[in-house]
Amino acid sequence: MSHPAALLGAALRRDAASPLITFYDDLSGERTELSGTTLANWVAKTANLLQDEFDVGPGSTVAVALPVHWQTAAVLLGVWSCGAAVLDTAAEDDGRLAAVDVVLAAQDRLPALEEQDLPDLMGLSLHPLGMGMAGYAGPARDFALEVRVHGDTFTPWQPVDPAGPGLRAGALELPLGGLVSAATELADRLGIEPGDRVLVDERAATEAGPVAWLLAPLAAGASIVLTRATEPDALLRRASAERVTATLGLTLDGVRELGRPA
């Protein structure tokens, strides 16, 4: 695999119709399920938006100031489809965004970002139905409104270079090809198996980073169940309802915990 978006292509070839990412937000009551085909559609639209509107491609850097979410998965894979690097950052930190080409941020983080001299800023409502930002009158462009008009298939203007920058997160820097290698190695080390349905909550996913919660399951041929604000006593019921076979960063009776001896 040359770059992270190729992992999604492999998932489509294995099984395009089955659930690939299922997302729960127990604050809003949201449950969103995306098949491989649906996720790929969002990824293509995102990549086309970034390329057509912001000239994102090899050598570009896109700052992603988003929580763990199914739309975040589409944004990350969309950036990598363009051959660009993701800056995963506490974006409000002074000076961190000086060299980025575009910033994609959750709506609640926009006020702090608007105080900086940013080249381009897009806001995401993260609405369950993909609606735009309600009650917002600032300068940021609305991701949800703009992404829907872009194409369902994506072709980069320039070939993706696996040696090009892929992820910058604190002191960590990985090339695009290195992200795939790291995800494959991590999946093997954790014991993720083909066909696994991996449950991970927002806390564990945030701490582990996108290589662990997104790319490693894709590399192993597994699907992902993301859950946010779920009470501990409800996690086992959630795991049962979603036919979870393994957890990441969670200990649940009767469910295999990845990275722990059996």
Image: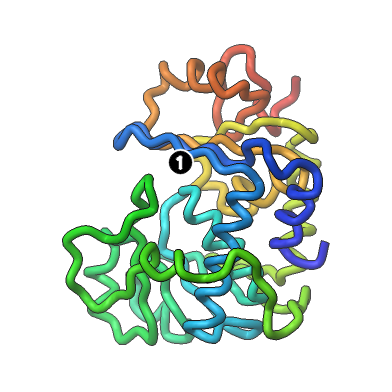
* 163 or 142: nearer the viewer: 142
Q: SS of the residue at dot 1?
A: helix
Identify the amino acid type marked 1: Glu
* 101 or 134: nearer the viewer: 134
Total marks shown come to 1
Q: Residue furthest top?
A: 254
Quadrant of the rendered image containing residue 221: top right
Can residue 148 be seen? yes
Rendered residue at 75%/35% (across/down)? 192
The reply, left or right, for residue 75 in relation to residue 219 is: left
Where the C terminus falls, by quadrant? top right
**Position of residue 149 measured from the top left corner of the image (x, y, whole percent):** 46, 69
**Position of residue 248 measured from the top left corner of the image (x, y, whole percent):** 60, 34
**Position of residue 212 measured from the top left corner of the image (x, y, whole percent):** 63, 47
* 195 or 150: nearer the viewer: 150
Q: Is residue 95 above or below residue 132?
A: below
Rendered residue at 37%/45% (across/down)? 128
Please tell me how crowded label 1 is: few (under 14), some (14-19), or many (20+) other residues with Cα within 10 Å. many
Rendered residue at 64%/75% (across/down)? 82
Q: Which residue is mark 1?
A: 202
Q: Is residue 148 above or below residue 236?
A: below
Where the N terminus falls, by quadrant? bottom right
Rendered residue at 27%/61% (across/down)? 133
Q: Is residue 152 above or below residue 10?
A: below
Quadrant of the rendered image containing residue 17: top right
The reply, left or right, for residue 171 in relation to residue 130 is: right
Quadrant of the rendered image containing residue 137: bottom left
The reply, left or right, for residue 127 in relation to residue 60 is: left
